Amino acid sequence: MRPFDYERPWNIDAALATVRDTPGAMYLGGGTNLIDLMRLGVLAPELLVDVSRLPFDRIEETGDGGLVIGAAVRTADLATHLGVRRRYPVLAQAALSVGSGQIRNMGTVAGNLLQRTRCAYFSDISKPCNKREPGSGCPAMEGVHRNLAIVGYSPSCVATHPSDLAVALAALDAVVRVEGAAGPRRLPITGLYRDPGDDPRRDTVLEHADLITGIEVPPTGAERSRYRKVCDRTSFAFAVVSVAVVLEVTGGVVRECRVAFGGVAPKPWRAERAEEALYGADATEENFARAARTEPAGARPLRDNAYKVPLVRNLLTRTLTELATEGR
Amino acid sequence: MTDELHSARVRTRTVRLTVNGVPHHIRVDTRATLLDTLRERLGLTGAKKGCDHGECGTCTVLVGGRRVYSCLTLTVAVDGAEVTTVEGLAGDGGPHPLQRAFVEHRAVQCGYCAPGQLCAAVAVLAEAEAGMPSAVTPDLSAPPALDPAEIRERMSGNLCRCGCYGRIAVAIAEVAR
């Protein structure tokens, strides 16, 4: 690991200024992904600015029934919060599906959103990777891509984004609070991530010194929500595919429906076509299956990952049906 | 690349740690993980280096009472913390109840994972006591009960190459009762 300096500023202005003035600086949260990537030689910051003890470690209830989740809240604490468990089961379930108990104690909410892809070529510095070394090529396109993207990718990068929380937050229409050189701004969670295009180096639209300070989760009228994740093993694994659903059914009719997929794209993927098909429709398994068949819209599976298309459709149908019948 | 590795100046920081009740004031390389500091600087070789990537769990220790992977924890980032390793689990009255149960149920074969399993198990009992749910908790709004399925899910961050999972789960269940 390359030597680096370490600073722990006690307020946000000092953190922003320190990173702004040091081109090789990176923020440090829980470190579960960053420290590993530094050890692997994938990342080599010259300065770590530790923001894990800044006062963004609380979950606040807003007057309108929503939540503001501090960026430095640990994943375990998000999953334990009673308001999250009662009003946003999809978010609590996504948090509980992250890593292991140790990872959930360490990792922060903002760090979960900003973690890097687990594409094996990205973390192997002996192989080319456009995300790591622009212009070096993407061996995954012709190589091992069983667990990579089926939609939203580009010829230069077929990596998926591994976050569980981002998928649940996408279905909840969450907004990311960012502090930067130009002052504070707010980004819808799906707008945080950028398409890889011909420059897959950056996963997000954040600029060098930009710092996520919190996540706004608006109130949802829908009582029912759920996160379902399919993995290669039962626990402590990244999603092969995942589905986050927020559903409101009244009198047998779908009144509200928001759906996001994980494990299929370089970003949490909103299934807007399925949502449109379901608004006002009878809440029947047949209708759920029909809506699921419209997704993932624009999918272009690679040689070895076409299985993800029926997998994510079936997972969506099953999740909608369970939510409509079980009510929670 | 070698030139680049050696051109950057090594940085050190002074940190305060209380490990198993003993205060330490030491200067460490900023790159030192908590695992390396415990093993190489403080002579506490209970926590083991297995994968060194946060995937196997044998480096598990408690920081401020919470279980973490010490291989992914920078020592500088836990300045001021109270750390408990497997060496600190036993009290004046002898081994920790979980240590007794591991021995009684022969939950240890080669033993390499045991320090991490024990520290994780101590945290699992505390987390359940505090009402923290898990991915298999049926009702997220109710307090969880540590049944076998719960124990297995909550212990999934610790691997055992000998495959002693069944015995480990039984030992934890006995103490959880």
Image: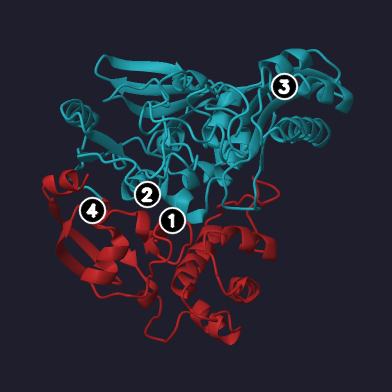
In the image, residue B80 sits, relative to residue A96, either above or below, namely below
Q: Which secondary structure, mark 1?
A: loop
Q: Establish whether labels 3 and 2 are both on one chain.
A: yes
The Cα atoms of the two marked residues, 2 and 4, are separated by: 12 Å
Q: Which amino acid type is shown beneath numbered disc 1? A: Gly
Q: Residue at x 41, y 24 (%)?
A: A204
Q: Establish whether labels 3 and 1 are both on one chain.
A: no
Q: Which residue is mark 4?
A: B31
Q: Residue at x 54, y 32 (%)?
A: A160
Q: Which residue is mark 2?
A: A36
The tint of chain A in the picture is cyan
The Cα atoms of the two marked residues, 3 and 1, are separated by: 35 Å
- Which corner quadrant of the image does residue B164 belong to? bottom right
Question: In terms of sequence position, does the residue under pointer 4 or pointer 1 come before the other?
Answer: 4
Can residue B64 be seen by looking at this rendering? no
Q: Which amino acid type is shown beneath numbered disc 4? A: Arg
The Cα atoms of the two marked residues, 4 and 3, are separated by: 45 Å
Which chain is assigned red?
Answer: B
Residue A295, which numbered label? 3
Q: Dot 2 falls on which chain?
A: A
Q: Dot 3 falls on which chain?
A: A
State the scheme by which the image is colored.
by chain
Q: Which residue is mark 1?
A: B54
The Cα atoms of the two marked residues, 4 and 1, are separated by: 16 Å
